[in-house]
Image (cartoon, rainbow, N blue to C red):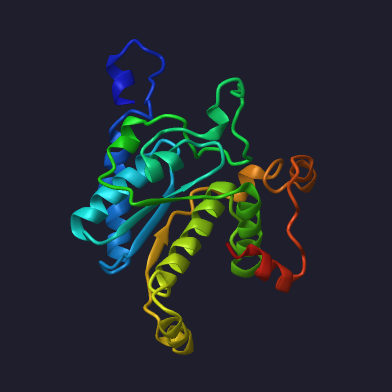
Amino acid sequence: RRVASFSQQRAICTDQFENPANNQAHCKSTGQEIFRQCGGRIDIFVASAGTGGTIAGVSRFLLSRLANTRIILADPPGSSLFALVKFGVCYAPQQRERTLRRHRYDTITDGVGLDRITSNFASATAIHDAYRVTDQHALLMAHFLFRFEGLFLGPSSAINCLAAVRAANDSLHQNEETSSFYINLFNHFFWHRPKYRVVTILCDSGQRYLSRFWNRQFLENRGLEWPPNDPDMLRQHHRP
């Protein structure tokens, strides 16, 4: 409205991928909100990247207050950001010469995953690790959350949640490879394992994906398996 009041233009491009106001907003609001609600204790923050503004802005604020917080990217198939974080090369196998397609992303996930480094993503202070999350695993996680937590979510949220579970599991098990003696001892005193506070973002509702992510026929036509109705089987299958 302010721009329209003195401009002859009938539209403006906010350029959410490159506009620094994107990550700055998350640094000044989302990051501070997470820090405040968690009482200043966050061990791991997990997020996927669409524009990169959320993970960049939140990570910048959290790391300014909590230097030991780990920032982890959740990435869908076809996105180049996973390889960028893991190996320093912005590349995905779907970019191979002679295989590049106009709509190349082999994923049903909308809104997250990139094949380039945006200004917002590049502004992140640090991203320590990345997890690749398949469509099938995201689908299982979404159904698990709907069945047992009452959360009707979209694929981006499901990717975030599954990566958060992986991050928690990896943190719990990272010290268990020292020797069989310590492994057995650690397992015996399972209840004494350290507790990690892992935070992620539920960024989309399932209501927007009724014709795709929550459409059984669409998914089966894409070669995906509709999650089981049996609660016990769903519990077993959803584990990453």
Where is residue 5 drawn, in percent x and y? 30, 19
Q: In which quadrant of the rendered view does residue 232 lie?
A: bottom right
Closer to us: 114 or 153: 114
- Any part of residue 72 in sight: yes
Q: Residue at x 34, y 10 (%)?
A: 8
In the image, farthest residue toward the left? 64
* 199 or 193, nearer to the observer: 193
Quadrant where the image shows the C terminus:
bottom right
211 shown above or below 17: below
Could you tell me if residue 29 is visible in this image?
Answer: no
Residue 64 picture location, percent across and down: 19, 54
User: Residue 212's spot in the image, x, y percent?
Assistant: 69, 41
> In percent of the image, x 36 and y 46: which residue is there?
55
Residue 49 against residue 45 in the figure, above or below? above
- Residue under the point 63% across and 63% down: 238
Q: Position of residue 81 (x, y in %)?
A: 43, 39
Left or right for 178, reference 125: right
User: Is 37 positioned to the left or the right of 170 in the image?
Assistant: left
| Residue name at image x 33 percent, y 48 percent | 127
Depth order, front residue of 28/115: 115
Quadrant occupied by the N terminus: top left
Q: How many marks?
A: 0
Q: Give the farthest residue toward the top.
A: 8
Find residue 189 and report its image quarter.
bottom left
